[in-house]
Amino acid sequence: MSDLISDNYSMLLVMSRFGIPIGVGEKSIKEVCKENGVHAPTFLAVVNFLLEEVPPKIDYKTLSKEHLIVYLQHAHDYFLNFRLPNIRRKLVEAIKDCPKDVAFVITRFFDEYAEEVNKHMMYEEHTVFPYVRKLLAGEKDPHYNITVFKKRHDQIELKIVELKNILIKYYPIDGGHLLNSVLYDIFDTEQDLASHNIVEDSLFVPAILELEKEINA
């Protein structure tokens, strides 16, 4: 596990979202997963999907749907309660000396973007995940299926591009190191949200489609 982290530091986020703390010693990935009650094949499926240029072949039936939900919920908490609020604080500080009307527009744009992310993730929290947990309990829902989610699943990371371009192209004064740091965080968040969507679209949805087939068989 330590080699995985050293070679790909972004895997720290994956570990955190599975509830795996650092301090892994010389233990293997399988040992660390077992120690923390994490389904190792599901953890590895996420890791491989995010790291490999050619997506690996996966038996979706073998994935732990509950552990995928835990992973996605921890990611939601990270974005909504840590990442985006921290970026906002830094952004407000970075633009405090620019014209008030410009600062207002930039801040409002960020707040609207954050609200879009919140709506996207709260739909999953309040509709999709409860639906899946009912399926896991053997309870069907005649009015909903995962295809509904798949059809309405928008790429929320694309919405941050406009804010990024506003700052890069049109910010009127030198924002110094702090503004550059904010921009770096925005780029990083854009990439992280894209990875989040990949897990949802390419692992979570196919796994739930398989579950639906089993339940309806």
Image (cartoon, helix red, strand yellow):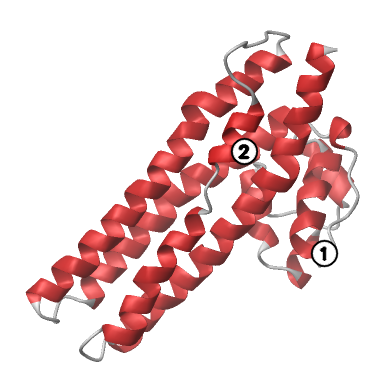
- Residue 33 in the image, given as x and y percentages of width and height: 80, 42
Q: Is residue 159 left or right of residue 21?
A: left
Q: Is residue 20 visible?
A: no
Label whose residue precedes the other's in the sequence (2 or 1) = 1
Amino acid residing under circle 2 = Lys
Give the vertical position of 170 relative to 132 (above or below).
below
In the structure shown, which secondary structural element does the residue marked by tag 1 occupy? loop
Picture mark count:
2
Residue at point 14% right, 67% down?
Answer: 104
What separation in Å lies between label 2 and label 1 (alpha carbons)?
23 Å
Give the vertical position of 203 relative to 28 (above or below).
above
- Residue 136 in the image, given as x and y percentages of width and height: 72, 17
> Looking at this rendering, what residue extends furthest in the top direction?
139
Which residue occupies the foreground of this view, 162 or 194?
162
Amino acid residing under circle 1 = Glu
Residue that label 1 marks:
52
Q: Is residue 217 left or right of residue 171?
A: right
Give the vertical position of 21 relative to 60 (above or below).
below
Determine whether label 2 and label 1 are within 8 Å by CB: no
Residue at point 56% right, 20% down?
Answer: 130
Disc number placed over residue 150 in the picture, else none: 2
Q: Residue 83 falls in which quadrant of the image?
A: bottom left
Tell me the quadrant of the picture where the N terminus can be found. Answer: bottom right
Which residue occupies the foreground of this view, 18 or 203?
203
